[in-house]
Image (tube, helix red, strand yellow):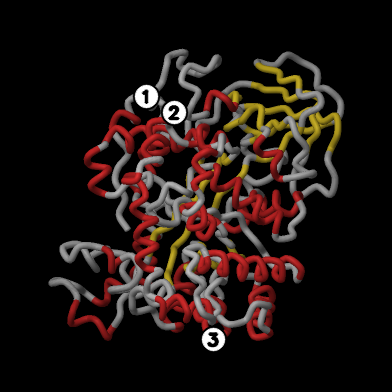
Amino acid sequence: MPRPNLPAKLLLAAMLACNAPLYAHSLLISDVILVSPERAAPLVHAHVLVRDGRIAEIRQSRPRGRFDQTLDARGRWLTPGLIDSHVHLGSDAGLREDQAQAHPELRAAFLAQEPRSYLYFGFTHLVDLNESEDFIRQWRALPLAPGLSYCKSLPFPGGYGEAFLPESVRNRTPYLLDDPAQRESMPEGYEPEEHTPDAVLAKVARTPAICVKTYFETGFAGLWDWPVPSDALIADVHQAAKARGRRHVHHANSLAGYRQGLAARVDVLAHGLWHWDAHNAERKLPPAIAKLLDELIAAGIAIQPTSQVLGAELRLFDPAFLDDPRLRKAVPAALLDFYRSEDAQWFRRKMEQNLQRTELVQQFLGAEANGDPRQTSQVALDRLQLVVRYLHAQGGRLLLGSDTPSSPTYTNPPGLNGLLELQFLQDAGLSPHEALLAATLDNARSIGLDGELGSIEVGKRADLLLLSADPLASVQAFDHIDQVILGGRVIKRETLAADACAAPGHQSGRKRAC
């Protein structure tokens, strides 16, 4: 779906035309406990030398010489910056369209804070699964923002995404996949040969996009009835993407969608398996699903559980969520005040309305509904945890992708949502080291950037986190970041917070909007 541009005022301070520039200086991180996912154990008393934004040297004796900047890191831990491989940037911040128009200052404040919130929670690189080149250029021109890679969305005529668009723009993207059965309803001037997998991927190859995203979504458990692509079409897309060096991410959260992804041998399944279709009545992992998961593991297909799709739904019904002190770090105060209003609860009311369709609810549950509006989301989350525990136990490839935001709601706050996803992985059985791997090196491998990102190794980009807590004891250590190091640039964490209007050490030295 098309996304609005960043406000022009965000671009006025841009100093360089590339994202998170590499600064020409030397930085020594001295006497640190180095924790990197490729290492079986931490490297204690490590000295990490950064030159021109890249890791130049790692040793256990202090290097000789003078350096532009030295960080005494005794008693602290150094990790790679985190990667979130499933985000949607530039959203409406949980505002309905009319609310965004009535309160443009709220959305502008959110967008100004969004890149800083990701950095505050340790995310130094993001992958937006559906973005435009204009947005990417604007983001990369910001003076302070995580690195950003992106996919091109390849929608199916009348399917997920396209179905929400006004008639005037529906089915008009150059990246639309052709469906012979719908050609008669296509807009005037539609040329089928321009929308074959080969033709579409040839267009993608002319952009900097590193991946493509396809969709198997029939309409969210019956709320809509959307057409879906055939297995053969998705398989052809995968071959065309592979031939052009692009990764293939497939939206699927159902048994049927997972089977399609397996048949096509996609690279990544974007979402966990929480629609169990014919097995919805089961409360333990059905053998048929376990068999499918075994086949996915054997095929090497990676999976983003995206548990916070469901967590966000549950938080809509939890008034205490807005009292979480971490929200003040992620979201501007004026927007938090709005979220406390009844007008801001519009999406919760929409969910409650959908849940009144008892036949759909019971079909999803495989049982009678109990009247609790949280029931469907909780059952889905319980299913997902069974799936993730099985994948983990059998050696499956799990990636941290938060799907921020997964819906037009305020309960997927940027950055914090990724920390919540990291906590889910630990709760589902991953050790803190395995969760770190899912959020760093394995994510980098999934997008083909493991030569640049994902671990602390000589030659890689110096996107690093300095922590005051042990990341191998708990993933909550990532809420104890002292400094974020972005391309060799040292940033005090608290200067990135939404409530840090005049925090000491803020780069401009001036009060900024909160």
The kind of residue on which mark 2 rests is Pro
Q: Name the residue under label 1.
A: 13
> Residue 233 is drawn in which quadrant?
bottom left
Circle 3: element type: helix
Q: Which mark is residue 143?
A: 2
Q: Give the x, y percent position of residue 450.
A: 63, 50
The residue at the point 28 percent across, 84 percent down is 180
The residue at the point 76 percent across, 68 percent down is 393
Dot 1: within a 10 Å radius of its alpha carbon, few (fewer than 14), some, or many (20 or more) residues?
Answer: few
Of residues 498 and 265, the one nearer the viewer is 498
Mark 2 or 3, nearer chain start: 2
Of residues 319 and 433, the one nearer the viewer is 319
Q: In which quarter of the image is the C terminus?
A: top left
Q: Mark 3 points at which residue?
A: 278
Dot 2: within a 10 Å radius of its alpha carbon, few (fewer than 14), some, or many (20 or more) residues?
Answer: some
What distance separates the C-alpha of mark 2 from that of mark 3?
A: 51 Å
Classify 276 as above or below 74: below
Mark 1 or 3, nearer chain start: 1
Circle 1: element type: loop
Q: Which mark is residue 486?
A: none
**Are the residues tagged 1 and 3 within 8 Å (C-beta)?**
no
The kind of residue on which mark 3 rests is Ala
What distance separates the C-alpha of mark 1 from that of mark 3?
A: 54 Å
Is 74 left or right of 275, judged from the image as shown? Answer: right
The kind of residue on which mark 1 rests is Ala
Instruction: Residue lying at the far front in this picture: please name it.
Output: 371
Dot 3: within a 10 Å radius of its alpha carbon, few (fewer than 14), some, or many (20 or more) residues?
Answer: few
Circle 2: element type: loop
Is residue 473 at all visible to an observer of this figure? yes
What distance separates the C-alpha of mark 1 from that of mark 2?
A: 7 Å
The residue at the point 47 percent across, 79 percent down is 362
